[in-house]
Image (tube, rainbow, N blue to C red):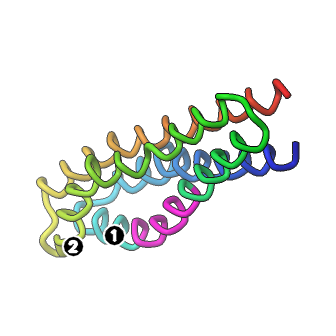
């Protein structure tokens, strides 16, 4: 039971961080002018990357271990859903991230703002994946 709770905590931390970014931080920064918007996004992205990446990896691996030790397909399914953030980020979001990181704030304008709007929509998928994994792990824990 304690192990399953740890898995749920990792997924919840990932989902909470992702949801905060999608629902609070990113909409707030969109109120800034283009240069300040990009200047705020770049260090924020750099600081969030290791936290969210680490939580996705640790949560996914812990979920697989829970599936192996506790049994029950929801642990494996939740792990796959949480781990899906990695390929989605690498294939879906990373091209946008690279373009945004390569743009200097003083060169920001309509194109960088459009990329940040796109980034917000892409990041919402990460929030949805984290939330789905959390709900799956919660159901698995409650069914024990």
Left/right placement of residue 4 relative to residue 18 reads right
Left/right placement of residue 74 relative to residue 120 reads right
Is 3 drawn above or below residue 71 in the view shown?
below
Q: Which residues are magenta?
A: 44-55
Tell me, yes or no, whether the highlighted magenta stretch contains residue 130: no
Residue lying at 52% horizontally and 49% vertically, measured from the top left: 18
Classify mark 2: helix, strand or loop. helix
Does the residue at mark 2 contact the one at mark 1 (Cβ under 8 Å)?
yes
Is 58 drawn above or below residue 125 in the view shown?
below
Q: Main secondary structure of the magenta part?
A: helix
Left/right placement of residue 7 relative to residue 89 reads right
Give the x, y percent position of residue 99.
Answer: 17, 63
Residue lying at 77% horizontally and 44% vertically, measured from the top left: 69
Q: Which mark is residue 22?
A: none
Tell me, yes or no, whether the highlighted magenta stretch contains residue 51: yes
Give the x, y percent position of residue 121.
Answer: 33, 40
Q: Which residue is mark 1?
A: 42
Classify mark 1: helix, strand or loop. helix
Q: Which residue is mark 2?
A: 105
Give the x, y percent position of residue 136.
Answer: 65, 30
Point out the tag, 2 or 1, that comes first from the N-terminus.
1
């Amino acid at each position: 039971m304690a192990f399953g709770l740890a898995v749920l905590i990792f997924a919840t931390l990932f989902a909470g961080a992702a949801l905060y970014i999608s629902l609070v931080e990113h909409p707030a920064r969109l109120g800034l002018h283009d240069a300040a918007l990009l200047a705020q996004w770049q260090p924020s992205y750099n600081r969030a990357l290791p936290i969210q990446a680490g939580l996705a990896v640790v949560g996914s691996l812990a979920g697989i271990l829970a599936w192996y030790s506790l049994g029950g397909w929801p642990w494996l399914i939740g792990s796959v859903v949480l781990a899906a953030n990695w390929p989605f980020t690498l294939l879906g979001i990373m091209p946008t991230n690279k373009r945004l990181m390569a743009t200097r704030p003083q060169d920001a304008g309509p194109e960088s703002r459009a990329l940040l709007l796109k980034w917000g929509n892409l990041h919402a998928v990460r929030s949805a994946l984290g939330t789905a994994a959390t709900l799956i792990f919660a159901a698995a824990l409650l069914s024990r």
